[in-house]
Amino acid sequence: MKFPSLKGSDPAQDGVIETENNDVVASENNKSFMQSILPVFACGSGLFAASYFEADFAPQVSSIAFAGTVVGQLFFGYLADRWSRVNTLLVSTIILIVFTALCAGSYWHGNTTSGTLSMLVAWRFFVGIGIGGEYPAGSVGCAESTGELKSGTRQRWFILFTNTAIDWGFVVGAFVPYVVAAACDNGHYSTQWRTSLGIGVVFPIILFLLRLKIKEPEEFSKNSMANARTPWWLVIKFYGFRLFAVSLIWFIYDFLTYPFGLYSSSILGNIYDSDTAPLTTIFGWNTVINLFYLPGTLIGAFVSDYLGPRYTLVLGVTLQAIVGFIMAGCYDSLAQPHMVGAFAVVYGIFLSLGELGPGNNIGLLASKTSATGVRGMYYGLAAAFGKIGAFVGTYIFKYIEQAGHDATTSAQYPFYVSSSLCILSALLALFLLPHVGQDTIQKEDLRFREYLESQGWDTRQLGLKKGAVLEAAPSHEQEYAVAAGETKA
């Protein structure tokens, strides 16, 4: 069943055109590069602040942060679809600013350690909610805004302002405490952690000011369901299996982050004694380890434009599995103190491949494999499932380690399991996920619109403004065609 278009609907104004080969592409816009790139940066780079705050805390602080992040991903994913991309981002940024400042100033009457830690745990939960909000609201807004950039460059800009920003956040999150520890001469511990957290407030404030200047992405304005009743059953039938595949790959990726971090302890253990080393040494080497992520994410951003996100993810996890099997098999030799240099190089390659593959592309796939009207919830569910995977991994891999009968096999077993799961991720992505091209968002919106129409759902509700009323259907039937803009008089 076809429904008439809204009065004045013009596909050229909708930002999409159809070629002679029926390929949907974004129409050209008159914005300068800086005007087009600003929303991409403002939406995506909030993940820099999110990763900056994901430092090592006491177990109870880390656990409550996990819980807050999952809550934020689910809640703000819903809010991004049902309210506004930009306003949702502003709210999550305010939460980050306020509760990070409260974390830095955590205090309990009498200034007892247990009381201060309890306050830190409480505030850290809300920081986690703000971090969780950055994932769906920021990433989907970033993905939709890339449609205004030059075709052939859209995947790289999304990656550079999301996953690359995350990796830089980890680097800066280790480097700032190093500088603060040096300034405090490795003493005054309360001043150190409060100052390090307090500095983290600066970037969200800058980001908040930038976000005040951006508008809703055009795709959201045209295809949102913010003012329509979402046909949940149709959405589940259309996207349920794909969402499961994306979520499972994300779960596996985050599930493996714990064993992937095991080798850093082996490297650093051959360089310094963690029980006696000064904080500047610990933070300095943590900065170096985090730098290993950058080559993979930077190179991979361009590879994703060339091969596409799906094949780049498959390539990355396959190569990572191979290197992981090699590292596990040669662990006894590589773990020797005189091999620390070679171990560090191979480990760096291993981490870089992880960023080139799933690190760069799982968020991109989650952002571009669903229609605009449900993209926030789709992404939020996948991201939350991944975060749960990370939480589960921190517990499961302890038992995998314990299955080893000596120090060598205890370190090898987690990586045999991890590398095997990398192969599983490659197969899932290769056979269950669609190709994501430069204009996939427009194509996906058109595909979803056609499906809804075939099920009898009035697609004139997509992009409906608040308070607007659908016009009665005219006496003659109009064929709605988003790409071609053809009308039947």
Image: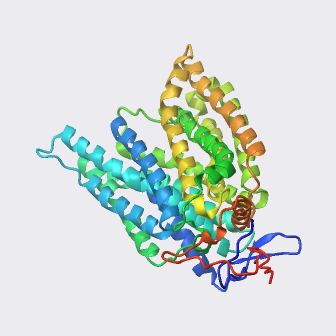
Q: Quadrant of residue 308?
A: bottom right
Against 246, residue 262 (above or below) is: above
* Along the line of sight, the residue nearer the viewer: 360 or 11: 11
Residue 37 picture location, percent across and down? 59, 74
Report if residue 438 is visible in the image. yes
Residue 156, percent across and down? 67, 63
Residue 11 position in % (x across, y down): 72, 79
Q: Residue at x 66, y 31 (%)?
A: 327
Residue depicted at x 59% and y 72%? 463
* Snapshot quadrant of residue 404: top right
As drawn, 361 above or below 344: below
In which image quadrant can residue 20 be found?
bottom right
Its colouring scheme is rainbow
Residue ID at (12%, 46%)? 109
Of 269 and 171, nearer the camera is: 171
Q: Is residue 320 above or below residue 90?
A: above
Viewer-proximal residue, 179 or 386?
Answer: 386
Tell me the quarter of the image containing the N terminus: bottom right
Is 280 displayed left or right of 167 in the figure? left
